[in-house]
Image (cartoon, rainbow, N blue to C red):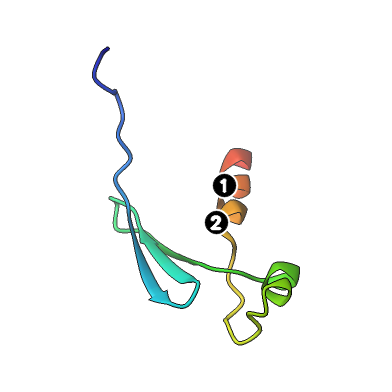
């Protein structure tokens, strides 16, 4: 098997509850968590409205 030609290197830290902060190798950071019906369904109404990780994936595929 050959060596991988790309290795993703990012860090994800827990801020509080389901709130996470990701840092990319370029230094770019972004926040993610829960929002909308998912937040309500799981009873996380006290959490801040933040994009879900899948929201970033969907946006990246369109870029």
Q: Quadrant of residue 21?
A: bottom left
Q: Position of residue 16 (x, y in %)?
A: 43, 79
Dots 1 and 2: beta carbons under 8 Å?
Answer: yes
Residue 60 vs 19, above or below: the answer is above
Residue occupying the point 27% across, 12% down: 1
Residue occupying the point 61% across, 48% down: 59
Q: Position of residue 9 (x, y in %)?
A: 29, 45
In the displayed structure image, the side of residue 18 where residue 54 appears, left or right: right
Residue pointed to by mark 2 = 53
In the displayed structure image, the side of residue 36 where residue 7 appears, left or right: left
Q: Which mark is on residue 57? A: 1
In the displayed structure image, the side of residue 8 where residue 52 appears, left or right: right
Quick one: label 2, few (<14), some, or many (20+) residues within 10 Å? few
Q: Provide the secondary structure element on which disc 2 rests.
A: helix
Residue occupying the point 73% across, 72% down: 41
Residue occupying the point 28% across, 50% down: 25
Q: Provide the secondary structure element on which disc 1 rests.
A: helix
Q: Quadrant of residue 30?
A: bottom left
């Amino acid at each position: 098997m050959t060596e991988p030609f790309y290795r993703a290197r990012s860090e994800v830290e827990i801020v509080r509850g389901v709130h996470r902060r990701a840092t990319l190798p370029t230094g770019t950071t972004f926040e993610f968590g829960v929002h909308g019906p998912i937040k309500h369904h799981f009873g996380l109404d006290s959490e801040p409205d933040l994009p879900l990780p899948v929201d970033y994936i969907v946006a990246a595929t369109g870029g």
